Amino acid sequence: MEETTIDLKDIIKTLKKRRGLIIKIFTGMVVFAVAISFLVPPTYEAETNLRIKQPKGLANSLLGDLPMGNSGATKQLMSTYAEILKSRTVVQAVIDKTQTDGVSEEDIPTYEQMLKRITTQPVKDTEILKVKVTAKSPEEAELVANTLVNTFNERMTYLVRSEQTGIREFIGERLKESKKELEQAETVLEKYKREQKIVAPEEETKAMVDKFAAVDKLAAENTVAMSAAQARLGTAKQQLNKEKPGFVADSPLIQQYKTKLAELEVNLVSLSSKYTEKHPEVMATRAAINETNSKLSSEISRVITADAPSMNPIHQGLLQSQIESEAEIAARTAQSQAIKGIMTSSEQDLNKLPAKEQGLAKVMRDANVNQEIYIMLAKRHEEARISEAMQPTDVQIIDVAIAPEKPISPKKTLNVVIAAILGLFVGTGIAFLLEYMNKTVRNADDVQQYLDLPVLGSIPDFDSKVTIGETGIWSNIKKMVTANSKEGRQG
């Protein structure tokens, strides 16, 4: 292979020869950068910092299943909150709040346009999430940034509290009804005692009522649990109707757990009619119910993670709440039917008592059941009310956004420096490219390379200060070289 040697003198000569072109390109690039820097409208950026704390005490909320306790979980949690912050619901609400007053309809940004102006960046190894928003003016940047984090906080609070609110409202209505039923049952009991002139029930009647007290309590638990499950199901469906629809494939294992759960609940009713709560079989059945519920929840979570139409943990939590509520309602329905069967059989035992004692036992059981239901509903209602009143999201605004003093773009000095460097490189590159493409014969080596002719001699470049005597000598040499060249061609 032939080696090409680049002479420094040739490089300097090329630069001198093409210096006009290089200067023109350099100047043009600099002028263009200056023009762009002053013509492009400035962009301002406002920044606010959020602290996303690990959720605690949210076992009954939609965020209760989010991972926590390690750096990987913290990173996932930060990503989840960042996606919710940039969700359509939050961003569109920000647009409606900040881009309507004094803004023409054509200038109102779309969701996609506003999304490009929002940047979220978690700070490594911390719970801090940086939120940056760009705008055409410092005031707008400050307003949009603060409105964004406030709207995000409101949205998270709403998502977490919505379930507890639904349960509280539903149980609250049921609590009012239960209070009326309890008052009516107690009134009936007092009226019956007064009419029948009974001060206290007979020992046999009291023993009969106490015998079925466990089943009566189980019936009360069934009623309260059914009410809570229906409330959760209604809330989950209401929230899912606002999300994009999707299909989650059913699992044979889920169906198996549902069937087993229903069987265990029915078995618990049968055992409760025979034994006390401390009996080993009753305790073992309740433990089996808790274990089956845990397995059912894990399987539902696995299926949702694989098949859910959205990767948003809030959406997945709603789906899981819906499926778990449906499973509990099915199990409670089966249990309710079993309880009705036990009560029907217990009626036969009560019929063996005297007529007066039969009536007393029935009204006493009704009063006891309604009292148990009212107490349980009141407890559930108070728990839901406390959970609703708690601050659930654990999102703290560390630094509110302030109006920036200087725009982040265009960066005039940087643009000019880059244009100047780019102009030098481009100008020099074009100069050498033109020189490379120039095939003019410039020296003896070019004659040999391009024309493949022998070189007998070369005439040096004359200086304008050459003397007459020197000119005469060189003239004779020139004639001799020319004559020899002719003879060589003739030969």
Image: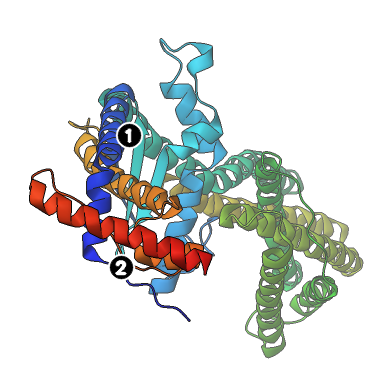
Relative horizontal placement of residue 111, taking residue 318 as reference (left or right): left
Q: Which mark is residue 146?
A: 1
Residue 188 position in % (x across, y down): 72, 43
Q: Is residue 69 left or right of residue 343?
A: left
Question: Which residue type carries mark 1?
Answer: Asn
Depicted 464 relative to depicted 211: above or below? above
Q: Which mark is residue 6?
A: 2
What's the residue type where badge 2 is placed?
Answer: Ile
Rendered location of residue 487, percent (x, y): 45, 65
Compared with residue 170, is residue 475 higher up or lower down, i.e. above or below? below
Q: Determine whether 364 is above or below 348 in the image.
A: above
In the rendered image, residue 450, in percent from the top left (x then y), is placed at 49, 63
The residue under the point 82% across, 63% down is 249
- The quarter holding residue 48 reads top left
Helix, strand or loop at mark 2: loop
Circle 1 SS class: helix
Closer to the camera, 134 or 422?
422
Q: Residue at the location (68% across, 79% down)?
A: 286
Other-residue count near label 1 (Cα within 10 Å), few / some / many at <14 / 14–19 / ≥20? many
Q: Is residue 427 above or below residue 371?
A: above
Q: Nearer the viewer, residue 235 or 68?
A: 68
Graded by Cα atoms within 10 Å as few (under 14), some (14 to 19) or many (20 or more), the crowding at tag 2 reads few
Q: Along the horizontal axis of the image, is 147 left or right of 237?
A: left
Residue drawn at x 31%, y 61% is 480
**What residue do we see at 84% from left, 71% from top?**
255
Q: CA distance from mark 2 to mark 1?
A: 62 Å
Can you tell which of label 2 and label 1 is closer to the viewer? 2
Can the viewer see residue 101? yes
